[in-house]
Image: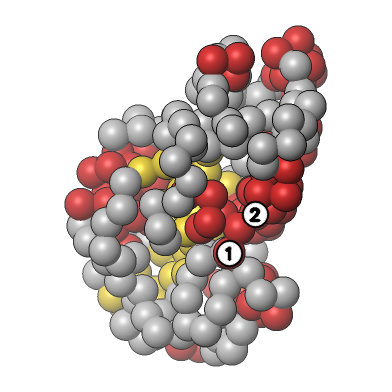
Amino acid sequence: MSDARLREEICRYGRSLFERGLTPGSSGNISLRLDDGGWLVTPTNASLGFLDPARISRLDAGGELVSGDKPTKEIPLHSALYETRGSARAIVHLHSTHAVALTMLPEIDPRAVLPPMTPYYLMRAGETALVPYYRPGDPAVADAIRGLAGKYSSVLLANHGPVVAGDSLEAAVFATEELEETAKLYLLLRNLNPRYLSPAQVADLVKTFGLDLPSHDDHEGHDHG
């Protein structure tokens, strides 16, 4: 896909996420890794609903700005996820309400913030890890993500929001949306003793769809409410 088409794709998905209230104001950012090792990334203080393709930041393989506006200050977390997830071609970071709310609950297991509620959560987002709070743009968040050793394609930043990698921008967006909807389901059902997928049902999904879940056999020990 051409550079121009990739820029248009970032704008199209960004607008969709913004218009549905998944990342308000100028929050959130999107990046795409290019074949030469460089990136396209949304600029700092830019609303995902009103992106200009020509102003999207173009970084070289070393992370230096080549063209466009100044990039998002969240470059360290994107860089760390690309570094540890070799298959990642795109990353979406949002401040979506239900996913952020989930990070503040006391019972959340940082190894798997959500129980196996639906097949599509596991198929698209996999397991989701929680990393501690860091101020936005803090380079230390990169070390926290590196500490996950690439096992997770979806990560929640405490009191901040999700960071999700995919092998395409579409895959990253769909996984982020699935994570947000599953977080919403969890909050709706919290303390109501819902029926989750059983270990056997999760194992069947893993086998059928070739899922790589870092802790798919460990759910029975999780305390989710």
- Relative to 10, 66 lies left or right: left
- N-terminal of the pair, mark 1 or mark 2, is 1
Which of pointers 1 and 2 indicates the residue nearer the eye? 1
- Secondary structure category for the residue under label 1: helix
* Residue 171: mark: none
Asked if marks 1 and 2 touch (Cβ < 8 Å), the reply is: yes
Q: Nearer the viewer, residue 179 or 101?
A: 101
The answer to whether 195 is drawn above or below residue 17 in the figure is above
Q: Position of residue 177 (x, y in %)?
A: 68, 56
Q: Residue at x 27, y 49 (%)?
A: 142
Q: Residue at x 30, y 66 (%)?
A: 136
- The kind of residue on which mark 1 rests is Thr
- Residue for badge 1: 97
The answer to whether 152 is drawn above or below residue 156 in the figure is above
- Residue for badge 2: 180
- The kind of residue on which mark 2 rests is Glu
Q: Nearer the viewer, residue 106 or 160?
A: 106
